[in-house]
Image (cartoon, helix red, strand yellow):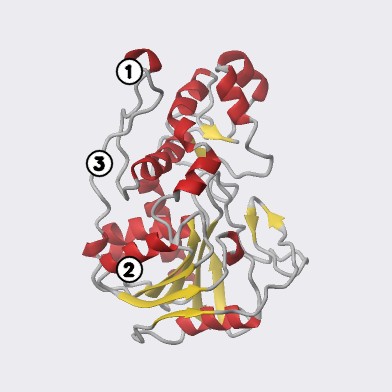
Amino acid sequence: MAAAGYDVYIGNNRGTEYSSGHDSLAYTSEEYWSYDFEGYTEDVLANMKMMFDHSGDKKGYYYGFSLGTVQMLMALPKFEAQLKDYLNKVVLLAPCMFLSEEGYTMLGAEEVGYYTNEMKKAGVYALKGPNWDMIQIKEQASAEAATFSGYWPDGFAPVGLKLQDHFFQLSTLKRFQKYAPDYFVSEEEIGTKTVVKEADLFDLASIGSIPISLINGLSDTSCEAAMTDETAEILKTLDNYISIQDKGHMQFDHGNQPDYIALLLNEAKTTGDKVKKTVVLEEEPEVEPEVLGGGIVATDGEEKKEGAMATQAVTFCTLMMAAVFLQ
């Protein structure tokens, strides 16, 4: 997209290498990491404002992948009045509201509420965060929680446990809702480890001005096509809805074949087509993406980090939050 004449900005979230400071809270404190997805919606707004200001007050096009779609779908009902000044359009790739049953089971999300409470016994408030100490976790948390901790590889950007719990709630209830506090009760009290409560929904039907295009993969088993269908039915500003045959979830973040790039570029050139179609793309190249700072940002085996902030990888998906502006 940069080669096509666009300035491309890649955003990041709080708690990452590029955004770890705070005016009053210590990076190692529990209070610092005490945020849910509402915090990430504020990061969307801050990123878009910074990009807009840096571009010379030119409105751009937001491209979000996976978690980047979750954040924007939550941010729009809350901040659309401001975001419409920064964005011409939102394009959501592999859109998600929660994980499918397969993705949910794969991650062991049913254990997360229990895991969070065990981690706090060991003084840990973020996955792979500043207080992450496997020796301490093994000594002070349960054996089950220590085993669970071993699943998270080195290189993951830190993610607050409260935010992880919020995503657990969404995937458990299959409900695009705000964080429900105090949903956890102990095994001794009710004979099970986790119980979640319903909270208010994020009101997608309230989005009224910014055009939104959805692009999903029909082989996506993490965020299935049926979920995109549900989202499309709710959105009043839906522009294009494009399904890609034989495309899985993680193929969205490193696909670089010409017809895929052309499809993405077209979204920044046209608005109002109201197209709904299924497309077949040429076979993807055999390229393993580079991992930089926890995010996938290279597509041809060469390191590409010039002036851009690496994207954040988290436990349930890889974040891509970017905006493009014509030079």
Amino acid at the residue labelled 3 = Ala
Q: In this image, 101 relative to 282: left or right?
A: left
Find the residue positioned furthest to the right.
302
Crowding at mark 2 (Cα within 10 Å: few <14, some 14-19, many 20+): some
Residue 236: quadrant of the picture: bottom left
Q: Which mark is residue 190?
A: 1
Q: Residue at x 43, y 79 (%)?
A: 58
- Going from N to C along the chain, the mark reached first, 1 or 2, is 1
3D distance between C-alphas at marks 2 and 3: 22 Å
Amino acid at the residue labelled 2 = Ala
The residue wearing badge 3 is 199
**Residue 303, position in %: x, y?**
75, 64
Cβ–Cβ below 8 Å for labels 1 and 2? no
Q: Residue at x 61, y 79 (%)?
A: 2
3D distance between C-alphas at marks 1 and 3: 21 Å
Q: Determine whether the residue tagged by mark 3 lies in a helix, strand or loop.
A: loop
